[in-house]
Image: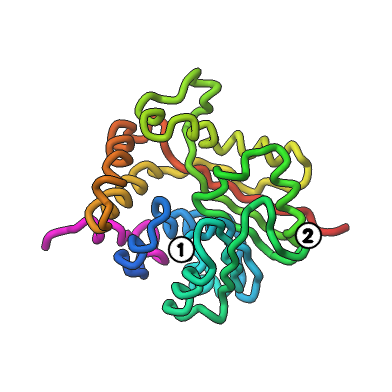
Amino acid sequence: MTVTSLDALVRPDRYPRASGYDPGWLVGLDMGPNPLWLLEDLARDLELRPGMRVLDLGSGKGATSVFLAKEYGVQVVAADWWVAAEEAARVFAEAGVGGQVEAVRAEAHALPFEEESFDAIVSIDAFEYFGTADGYLPQLLRFLRPGGQLGIATPALTREVRELGAIPPHVRKLVGWEALAWHTADWWRFQWEITELVTVTSARLQEGGWEDWLLWSRACAAHLPDGPAAHQPVIDMLTADRGEFLTFALVTARRPPRP
């Protein structure tokens, strides 16, 4: 049997939950690398229980929100600035979770929610666009209930650019200065802990994250209409890197309970 690039996105040994989803469906919702693999790995460091209200911040076309609703039985608010709420709502309805997931179009600095209205906030391959500013965490935590959890999965370098002295050439060629936001897990730990507003419960670089990213990019290149043009440069970057600098940071924290 010929193994296709889509077949490579089914990995029950490492991602048993995500492997139950049609890889063609996932690739069709592409807005970033392997979102369900990232979320399944991140969720191992969270305590998600049925009935929780969860904000999926930077939810894209909705794959992660579908996954949260189906796999963990939570109520999800899917917030994204780039995807219309109507478009995301169609994805949720077709996936059978329309009653569990609310689609909202919102910018990360102007979230239209009541304070302390979520039990958890997760962000998959999005936090690097808005969450690196010193003042963002305190702003976001207003929406998290005391005792609530925060979890992010974000592209990362294995060493800080400041330490390296420059962005690695093969990374700079593709993403330029944006790689400055691809911080290490230790950077995120310090950035959050220094506020004394949360307790960081885990902060780690994902083992094999570059390889997961490469498998996803090859599938997108082979199966999306604009795949080769859009994804071959990413494939070239990851192939050149071979895990030396590129991976993902998975970081979770908890807001202290009210005294």
Question: Residue lying farthest right?
Answer: 259
- Please name which of the two marks, 1 or 2, marks the residue nearer to the observer: 1
Q: Please report the residue visible at 65 percent of the width from the left and 49 percent of the height from the top.
A: 201
Observer-nearest of 84 and 206: 84
- Asked which secondary structure carries label 2, the reply is strand
Left or right of 149? Residue 207 is left
For the C terminus, give its image quadrant. bottom right
* Residue 17, image x, y percentages: 42, 66
Q: Please report the residue visible at 62 percent of the width from the left and 55 percent of the height from the top.
A: 107
Magenta segment includes 27: no
Real-space Cα separation, disc 1 to disc 2, in angstroms = 29 Å
Assess whether mark 2 and mark 1 are in contact (beta carbons under 8 angstroms).
no
Residue at which label 1 appears: 61
**Res 95 → quadrant:** bottom left
* Residue 111, image x, y percentages: 68, 58
| Precedes in sequence: disc 1 or disc 2 | 1
Three-letter amino acid code of the residue under disc 2: Pro
For the N terminus, give its image quadrant. bottom left
Residue at which label 2 appears: 146
Q: Please report the residue visible at 40 percent of the width from the left and 64 percent of the height from the top.
A: 18
Residue 168 visible from this viewpoint: yes
Which residues fall within the magenta stretch? 1-18
Three-letter amino acid code of the residue under disc 1: Lys
